[in-house]
Every structure is written in structure tokens, then in C-alpha cells.
Image (cartoon, helix red, strand yellow):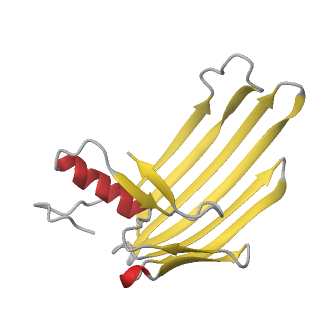
Amino acid sequence: MGSGAAHAVELASHKAIYDIRMKSAQTGSQVLDVTGKMLFSFRKSCDGWISNHKFLLDYQYTGTPPLQIESKFTSFEDFNGKLLNFSSNRLTNGEMDQQVRGIAKISGGNKGSAVYSMPENISFPLVDTTLFPAAHTIKLIESAEQGQKIVNAQVFDGSDDKGPVEINA
């Protein structure tokens, strides 16, 4: 994961609570308002990073009943950025509408994969350069320290069943 920087990036365990409010909507938008809270925690364990996210969002729409979305996401990423265990649940108006669980591994020779136990029969190949969330954060910090302004990466976080995404930061 390291890029030969003079020092290794040390991430800090932390916890934050965010108040979420929609600032504005485009004219003609069906979304009238979004409000809610997000709790995020990130802590160092013996073998890696444990992260927890919890969102509780209320959506107000034009001409339809409001929606309340509650999502909980937990992951464990080992320190070398090669293993990610992930689990998430999403409830809409109190009813379970999505559950995701699985394990992702990055192996040499582009033989890595993300394999879901929920929903079943979903998997994605992961190339050697795929980054999990903590590894991506470390790469962003290292790149900034080296003066890079834009970092492109393929990132997999396991928060849904859509697979890895290309991120420019």
C-alpha cells in the first residue's frame, strides 16, 4: 500500500455525528426536502480497521408520501488492505428492503474477488489495484503529500450489490 513516502500514514480512530439537511433543490425537482443524521465511527482493532455508518434520512417528495430510509453498514478491513468483510441493512419506512453481506479479497495476479453471501450468487472480480476504503484514504493522503491534485482509483466498499466503482478525488 505504501508509495515510498518518507513516513507511513497513520489513520486515527474517530467518531462523528453529522446533521444532514438539503440546502436547495432544482426547479421542478420531485424532492422537496431531505433531513436526517449520520453516525460514523472508525476504529483501529488488533488486525485492521472497523468502520460503522448509520444513516437515518427523511425524504419529502411532491405528491407522494414521505420516505424514511435507515441504513446500517459495518466493515472490517485488514491493515494491509487485502481483506474486507462487509455487512449492511437498509430499511424503508421500517421495512427491510436490502441486506448485503460478504467478503472481498485482493490477491496477486488479478485473482481477487468480492463474494456475497447476501444476496446469494453475486460476485465481482477485483484487480490488484482495487482499493478498500481505508486503503483509499491512505492513498489520498500519500498522494496529497506528494503534491498530486487528482487521484483516480477503483474502490470497493461492499455497501451495496453494485461492485467496485471508479472514483476521482
> Please, is residue 60 above or below residue 133 in the view?
above
> Please, is residue 111 above or below residue 24 in the view?
below
Whether residue 13 is visible to the viewer of this picture, yes or no, is: no
> Please, is residue 16 above or below residue 107 in the view?
above
Q: Quadrant of residue 28?
A: top right
Place of residue 9 in the rendered image (x, y in percent of width and height, measured from the top left): 23, 60
Residue ranking furthest to the top: 27
**Count of residue discs:** 0
Q: Residue at x 17, y 44 (%)?
A: 147
Whether residue 129 is visible to the viewer of this picture, yes or no, is: yes
- Residue 95 as seen in the image, left or right of residue 152: right
Locate the N terminus by quadrant.
Answer: bottom left
> Please, is residue 66 above or below residue 119 in the view?
above
Q: 91 and 107: which one is in front?
A: 107
Q: Residue at x 72, y 26 (%)?
A: 33
Q: Residue at x 36, y 83 (%)?
A: 108
Place of residue 156 in the rendered image (x, y in percent of width and height, measured from the top left): 50, 63
Place of residue 129 in the rendered image (x, y in percent of width and height, measured from the top left): 36, 68
Q: Residue at x 76, y 61 (%)?
A: 98
Place of residue 104 in the rendered image (x, y in percent of width and height, measured from the top left): 52, 76
- Residue 57 as seen in the image, left or right of residue 85: right
